[in-house]
Image: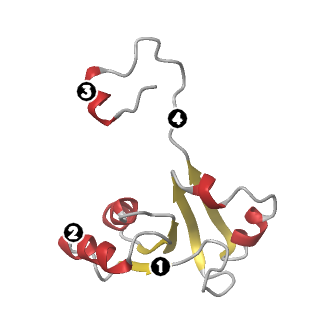
């Protein structure tokens, strides 16, 4: 299975997908250099299944229908706001493939703030 992890940052999601599902992942991000992602891939023992590249989400260098899945975790809102973007990105997914967009959020307000275990990672305003 071929997966494009779009807006992958340092490739943590790409490494997870390759390790857990035994798939090949193209780890694409505009801001994080491929050599930085490759170092993480190598340390995870996955440099043959996680392929890092620098790519701009509006000018992707792939053939139509190339991917089984296009996955974006906590990044789609940076590049997918154009009304026509879903149509653009969909052309890179094979017939019957999947577009997966995951955006973290809360199911309910936390009136007393985050749990103590999350506070070091939480920006409260």
Q: Residue tagged by mark 1?
A: 54
Alpha carbon of mark 4 to alpha carbon of mark 1: how far? 27 Å
Count neighbours of disc 1 (C-alpha within 10 A) and say few if under 14, some if 14 to 19, many if 20 or more.
some
Which residue is labeled 4 in the image?
105
In percent of width and height, residue 69 lies at 57, 67
Q: Earlier in the sequence, mark 4 or mark 1?
A: 1
Name the image colouring.
secondary structure
Tell me which residue sits at (54%, 62%) in the image: 71
Distance in Å between CA atoms under marks 4 and 3? 17 Å
Marks 4 and 2, the one that precedes in the sequence: 2
In the image, residue 7 above or below residue 117: below
Query: Which residue is depicted at the point 32% across and 73% down?
Result: 37
Q: What crowding class fits label 4: few (fewer than 14 Cα within 10 Å), some (14-19), or many (20 or more)?
A: few
- Whichever of labels 1 and 2 marks the residue nearer the N terminus, that label is 2
Please rate how many residues cluster around mark 2, counting C-alpha atoms within 10 Å: few if below 14, some from 14 to 19, many from 20.
few
Q: Which residue is mark 3?
A: 117
Name the secondary structure under disc 3.
helix
Residue toward you, 108 or 112: 112
Q: CA distance from mark 3 to mark 1?
A: 34 Å
Residue positioned 30% across, 27% down in the render: 119
Q: Residues within 10 Å of mark 3 (few under 14, many from 20)?
A: few
In three-dimensional space, the C-alpha distance between marks 2 and 3, rounded to whole angstroms, equals 26 Å
Point out residue 28 in the picture as x, y percentages from the top left corner. Answer: 48, 73
The residue beneath circle 2 is 44
Q: Nearer the viewer, mark 4 or mark 1?
A: 1
């Amino acid at each position: 299975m071929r997966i494009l992890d779009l807006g992958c940052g340092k490739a943590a999601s790409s490494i997870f997908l390759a390790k857990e599902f035994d798939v090949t992942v193209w780890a694409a991000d505009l801001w994080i250099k491929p050599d930085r992602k490759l170092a993480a891939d190598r340390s995870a023992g996955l440099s043959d299944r996680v392929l890092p590249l620098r790519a701009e989400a509006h000018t992707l260098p792939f053939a139509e229908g190339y991917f089984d899945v296009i996955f974006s975790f906590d990044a789609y809102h940076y590049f997918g706001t154009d009304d026509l973007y879903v149509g653009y990105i969909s052309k890179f997914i094979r017939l019957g493939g999947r577009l997966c967009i995951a955006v973290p959020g809360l199911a309910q307000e936390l009136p007393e703030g985050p749990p103590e275990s999350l506070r070091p990672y939480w920006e409260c305003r």
